[in-house]
């Protein structure tokens, strides 16, 4: 809730045995994030971190998975075979867009996690840098490229290593172009669509949006990015 | 969930007796936000034809194991949580 979209794997290792969990909603709010329970053990899990904080599975961590908040138009163009969750819209809710005018992001940041490391990219800082924008960064030993589109609020991060080579990107229209070969990449799918690298895909990174002031609460050991780029 | 939803949760907390929970504040009854559980998904065409999503709507997109799925934010705001499987991986989708 509160504009934090996170996707986890539901399978964990319990004493060497795989355990697939089914989750329910406790109705409990903790630090403006909700608390989940699993039907198998009744353990309590924090939505913001995917960690079990209470119960038999206390200390367990769900794997964080890559996800992206973007417009339907862009998502469908990037993934023509996509399927869609059916349902009714919440009549009592403001839309994501209404939250903050055009971009709808407020003080949101993109959180990228690699192993134990978490790094926040405040989207507002990138808005000042112009329309669409890329940042070349490192998280530990992993070279990362972060794409932010001010126009539609899309933000995505990718591992920019290809065949042991570290790539550097610029924004060209709605695409990324690597300086090494001039290939054009989709920032939404990580696929090279034309040029010498065509067909190559960047490795995805676990990422989700989170309000900036929540980052220090849920990721106290995390780091915050500036906008300095290579 | 949107800010209106956050306020709704806070209001619910005032109206409901604050339960004794191991962590956090009971702001709504358990599963008052009904999680979705493995629903039959729509094709992109069916979703557009049925008015489930429009071009400018925000979606939470996930691509995994060669499959892609869009979870419209306005629908996620109703559930806040869902159990699903994508590309062979069991996943939990949260908002």
Image: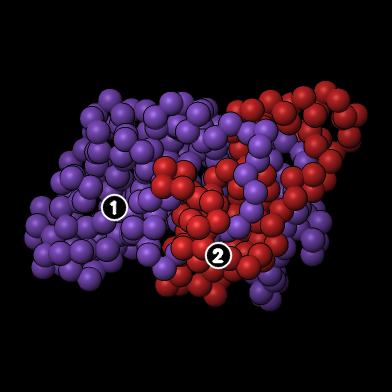
Tag 2, which chain? B
Measured as percent of width and height from the top left, residue B85 is found at 59, 68
**Residue B44 pos. (x, y %):** 47, 62
Chain name for mark 1? A
Which numbered marker is on residue A109?
Answer: none
The residue sitting at 79% across, 44% down in the picture is B32
| A88 relative to A95 in the view: left or right | right
Which residue is depicted at the point 58% across and 31% down? A94
The purple-tinted chain is: A
Query: Are circles 2 and 1 on residues that touch, CB within 8 Å?
Result: no
Q: Which mark is residue A187?
A: 1
> Quick check: A28 left or right of A154?
right
Residue A82 lies in what quarter of the image? bottom left
- Which chain is in red here? B
* Residue nearest the observer in this picture, A103 or B51: B51
Q: Tell me the quarter of the image containing the C terminus of chain B.
A: top right
Question: Same chain for marks 2 and 1?
Answer: no
Is disc 2 placed on a helix, strand or loop? strand
Q: Quadrant of residue B73?
A: top right
Identified at 33% across, 58% down, the residue is A77
User: Would residue A98 be found to the left or right of residue A147 on screen?
Assistant: right
Foreground residue among A222 and B85: B85
- Which residue position is annotated with label 2? B42
- Can residue B21 be seen by looking at this rendering? yes
Q: Residue B9 at what x, y percent from top left?
A: 73, 31
Mark 1 element type: loop
Question: What is the quadrant of residue B78 in the picture?
Answer: top right
- Compared with A19, A91 (above or below) is above
């Amino acid at each position: 809730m509160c504009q934090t979209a996170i996707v986890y794997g539901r399978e964990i290792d319990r004493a060497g045995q795989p355990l697939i969990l089914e989750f329910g909603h406790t109705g409990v709010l903790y630090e403006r994030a909700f608390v989940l329970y699993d039907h198998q053990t009744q353990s309590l899990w924090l939505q913001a971190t995917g960690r079990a904080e209470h119960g038999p599975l206390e200390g367990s961590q769900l794997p964080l998975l890559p996800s992206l908040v973007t417009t339907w138009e862009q998502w469908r163009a990037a993934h023509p075979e996509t399927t869609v969750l059916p349902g009714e819209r919440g009549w009592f809710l403001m839309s994501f867009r209404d939250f903050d005018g055009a971009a709808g992001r407020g003080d949101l940041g993109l959180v990228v996690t690699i192993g134990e490391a978490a790094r926040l990219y405040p989207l507002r800082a990138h808005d000042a840098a112009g329309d669409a924008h890329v940042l070349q960064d490192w998280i530990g030993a992993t070279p990362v490229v972060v794409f932010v589109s001010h126009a539609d609020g899309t933000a995505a991060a990718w591992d920019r290593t290809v065949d042991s080579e570290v790539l550097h990107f610029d924004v060209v229209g709605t695409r990324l172009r690597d300086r090494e070969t001039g290939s054009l990449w989709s920032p939404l799918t990580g696929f090279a669509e034309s040029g010498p690298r065509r067909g190559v895909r960047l490795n995805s990174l676990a990422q989700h949006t989170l309000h900036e002031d929540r980052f220090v609460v849920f990721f106290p050991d995390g780091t915050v990015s500036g906008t300095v780029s290579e | 969930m949107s800010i209106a939803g956050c306020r709704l949760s806070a209001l619910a907390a005032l109206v409901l007796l604050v339960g004794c929970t191991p962590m956090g504040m009971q702001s709504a009854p358990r599963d008052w936000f009904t999680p979705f559980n493995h629903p039959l998904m729509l094709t992109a065409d069916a979703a557009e034809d049925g008015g489930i999503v429009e071009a400018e709507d925000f979606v939470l997109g996930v691509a995994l194991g060669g499959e892609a799925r869009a979870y419209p934010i306005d629908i996620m705001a109703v559930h806040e949580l869902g159990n699903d499987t994508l590309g062979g991986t069991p996943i939990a989708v949260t908002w």
